[in-house]
Image: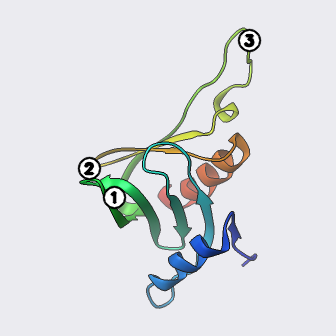
Amino acid sequence: MADPMYDRRDQYEKVQEVLLPGEQVEAVFDLIGTGTGFVGITSHRLIVYDKAFLRKMKAVVSIPYNRVLTLAAEDQSGLMTGRGFFGSSHLIITTSHGEHDFEFRGADKAHLAHNLILRHIL
């Protein structure tokens, strides 16, 4: 397996601290927007650290891939942008408990995260 991708080493290390035996980090991406945190993509689950995820407190939330119902990339097509689905930095993940909106630091990272997650849910 290739070396994990990450934006910030401290976030990568936080994800490593909560790994299960045999679980591997694939990527850790810094998020922007409300409750700014990060998302770790591992071989077993998504690990989300968000300051506003649950009741306005800092939380580390695990989302097993078998609980992900849909994965959506925001469409940024239009007359002015013409960029399409991967011109946006937003991904929306739907689980049985609701939607989780992630805004990445760039469309390229959102696209990469989309592909990594999609491999696990198909």
Nearest to the observer: residue 118 or residue 54: 54
Dot 2, crowdedness within 10 Å: few (<14), some or many (≥20)?
Answer: few
Q: Are marks 3 and 2 in contact (CB under 8 Å)?
A: no
Q: Which residue is mark 2?
A: 96
Taking the spot 60% from the left edge, 47% from the top edge, the residue there is 104
- Classify residue 44 as left or right of residue 98: right
Residue at the limit of the structure toward the bottom, as seen here: 21
In the rendered image, the quadrant that contains the N terminus is bottom right
- Classify residue 53 as left or right of residue 85: left
Taking the spot 61% from the left edge, 75% from the top edge, the residue there is 10
First in sequence: mark 2 or mark 1? 1
**Looking at the picture, how far across and down is residue 112, in whole percent?**
68, 52
Tag 2 secondary structure: loop
Mark 1 or mark 3: which is in front?
3
Query: What residue type is disc 3 on?
Result: Met
Tag 1 secondary structure: helix
First in sequence: mark 1 or mark 3? 1
C-alpha gap between disc 2 and disc 1: 7 Å
First in sequence: mark 3 or mark 2? 3
Query: What residue type is disc 1 on?
Result: Arg
Q: Which residue is mark 1?
A: 67
Residue at the limit of the structure toward the top, as seen here: 79
**Looking at the picture, how far across and down is residue 19, in whole percent?**
47, 83
Taking the spot 37% from the left edge, 62% from the top edge, the residue there is 66
Tag 3 secondary structure: loop
Q: Which residue is mark 3?
A: 80
Query: What residue type is disc 2 on?
Result: Ser
Dot 3, crowdedness within 10 Å: few (<14), some or many (≥20)?
Answer: few
C-alpha gap between disc 1 and disc 3: 37 Å
